[in-house]
Every structure is written in structure tokens, then in C-alpha cells.
Amino acid sequence: MLARSCLRSTRIVGAVRTVAVNTSKRAASTASAAEASPFRLNMAGGAATAVAIGSIGWYYHLYGSDLHAMTPVEEGLHPTAYPWVHTKWTKTFDHQALRRGFQVYQEVCSSCHSLSRIPYRSLVGVTHTVDEAKAMAEENEYDSEPNDEGEIEKRPGKLSDYLPSPYKNDEAARAANNGALPPDLSLIVKARHGGIDYIFNLLTGYPEEPPAGAVVMEGLNFNPYFPGTGIAMARVLYNELVEYDDETPATTSQMAKDVTEFLNWAAEPEMDQRKKMGLKVLAISSVLFALSVWVKRYKWSAIKTRKITYNPPQAGRHGRGSH
């Protein structure tokens, strides 16, 4: 009996010792896990943030920056920046200015430059009414479909026709301009470094006389904003050159401003609609973001506010239960 009792006591002591060791190990592992978990979470969050920022930066490097046909050094004198109203986020084109700019293009610029990407229907509701656009289109003749005999006849223009070019082809344009090819103005704002500021400064940058020391080749005109300062196009805008229908004073700067804004519209006819859609997207995204934050806090509130405790087994209970 004594031996059996001693053996039983030894087993109880060993069980208590094992429970104590396991409890201490479990507590130590829990403590180490609790210490390591926030560090790992912070590392994972930092890595994810770095990857997101790097992805955004790389995307902007590839597609976000403006792409220019020439470098600023090759472009000549840097154009003066002006506070154009239509470039602001919540502003649209001044349609009266667009109408005046089209008039300047039609009476001054269209004799040399084409606007081949703009159909008459694009002017409806922007610069002219439907009847006005139809009347302008019918003033020009376009090739019709071949008839039964294969002959192509002329027909009056329609709203679906594009603005006519002043020349039949590039060779005829060069022959009429001493070898220089007048560029198409449909995308000229996007094709030049400086955009609308460059166009405006170019049109208003002709001095009365070239500055001292400036060398201008024969047949060219001095303009500091043009690459090389020698441009084949002479000054074309002079005060009172056109007569606006709304009786706006037709100064050189006013005509340059109007035609520049019109050319900006020609390069971006969807700008007003894009801004309107952008504001709608921002408004809807803000509401959805607020709802997502509320749902996240609601779903995770029970998990983030709960308290987890560990109650180790009592050694005395095992001892009393064994006797």
C-alpha cells in the first residue's frame, strides 16, 4: 500500500509538473506570437503600400506625362502661360469665343490651313445652329458616288462632310507656299509643346522688325517662339481684320485668343463632356467610399472589440481530484 501510494503521488507530481511546463510554453508561444504578429502586419502593410506607390509612379512615368514631338530646347522661346478659363476643372468652353474663333479660321486661316478632322455636324450646338451648319456645308461641292457610267458628279455638301481643304494635295500646297507645307490645324494644339499658349504666343509674337543680330533666311519671317526663329508664315492677324457678328472689337490679341480657343476645341471636342462625367464619377465614388468605410467598420466592430483571454488549469484541482 505504501509503495502504491508513493507511486501514485509521484505520478500526480509529474502530471502537475507537465501541466505547468506546458502552460508556461503555451503562454510563452502566445506572447511571442502576439509580439511577432504586429511586426509582420506592419511589414506586410508597408510592402503593399510600397508596391502600390511604385505601380502608380511607373504608370505615370509611362502614360501620365505629356508627350511632345520636340524637346523644350528645340521649341525656341518658351511661351508665356495665360490663365485660360476653359482649362479649369469646373469650367467649359466659351461658345461665343468658339464662334468668333471659327469665323477667324474661316476668313483668315482656311486659305492656307486645313481642318480635315472636323465635320460640319460637329459645329451644331457648339458654334452654329443646324440651319447655319447646313448652309455652310452646301456652299461647297463634294464628290458623289459613281453613277452607272462610272462618272463621279459633284453634289452640295451635307452635315456629314468634313471641312474642305484649301489644296488638292500636299504638292499643290507646297507649290503655293514656296515649298513650305502648311500643317493641318485639327490637332495642332496637341502637336506643339506649350499647347494653346504656344499658338497664342506664335500668332501675337511677330515684331515690327527683327532684333539686332538676328539672322533670318530669305523668304522666312522672324518669330522668337518658332523653332529656329524663322517661320514661313507671315503675320496674318491685324486689328479690325474681321468684323465680328457680336460687335466684339477685333484686335490682334482678341482674334488670336478666339481662334486659339477654337483650335483647342477642335483638338478636344469632348472636353466638356469629359469634365461633366468626371464630376459625376467623383460624386458617386465619394458616396460609395463612405458606404464602404461604414460597412467595414460595422462588419469588423465585433471582431476588433472582442477580448480573448486564456484561463490556465489550476494545479490544486488535479491534486484534490486524485485523492
Image: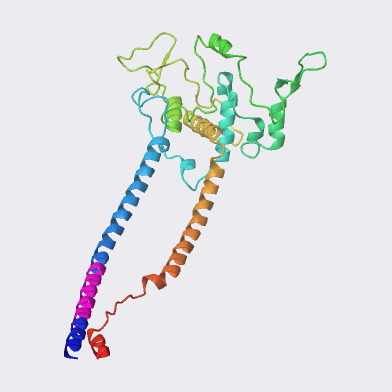
Q: Residue at x 34, y 12 (%)?
A: 215
In magenta, the rendered stretch is: 13-30
> For this rendering, which residue is in front, 139 or 212?
139
Q: Is residue 172 left or right of residue 144?
A: left
The reply to whether residue 247 is in sight is: no
Q: Which quadrant is the N terminus positioned in?
A: bottom left
Q: Residue at x 48, y 63 (%)?
A: 291
> For this rendering, which residue is in front, 158 or 299?
299
Dividing the picture into quarters, in which one does residue 170 lie? Answer: top right
Q: Which quadrant is the C terminus positioned in?
A: bottom left
> For this rendering, which residue is in front, 259 or 33?
33
> For this rendering, which residue is in front, 308 or 253?
308
Q: Residue at x 30, y 53 (%)?
A: 46
- Secondary structure of the magenta portion, mostly? helix
Query: Where does residue 299 sit, x and y in percent of width and height?
Result: 45, 68
Q: Is residue 70 left or right of residue 31?
A: right
Q: Residue at x 36, y 42 (%)?
A: 57
Query: Any magenta on residue 29?
Result: yes
Query: Where does residue 274 sit, x and y in percent of width and height?
Result: 54, 44
Query: Any magenta on residue 3?
Result: no
Q: Is residue 310 above or below residue 115?
A: below
Q: Is residue 313 above or below residue 119?
A: below
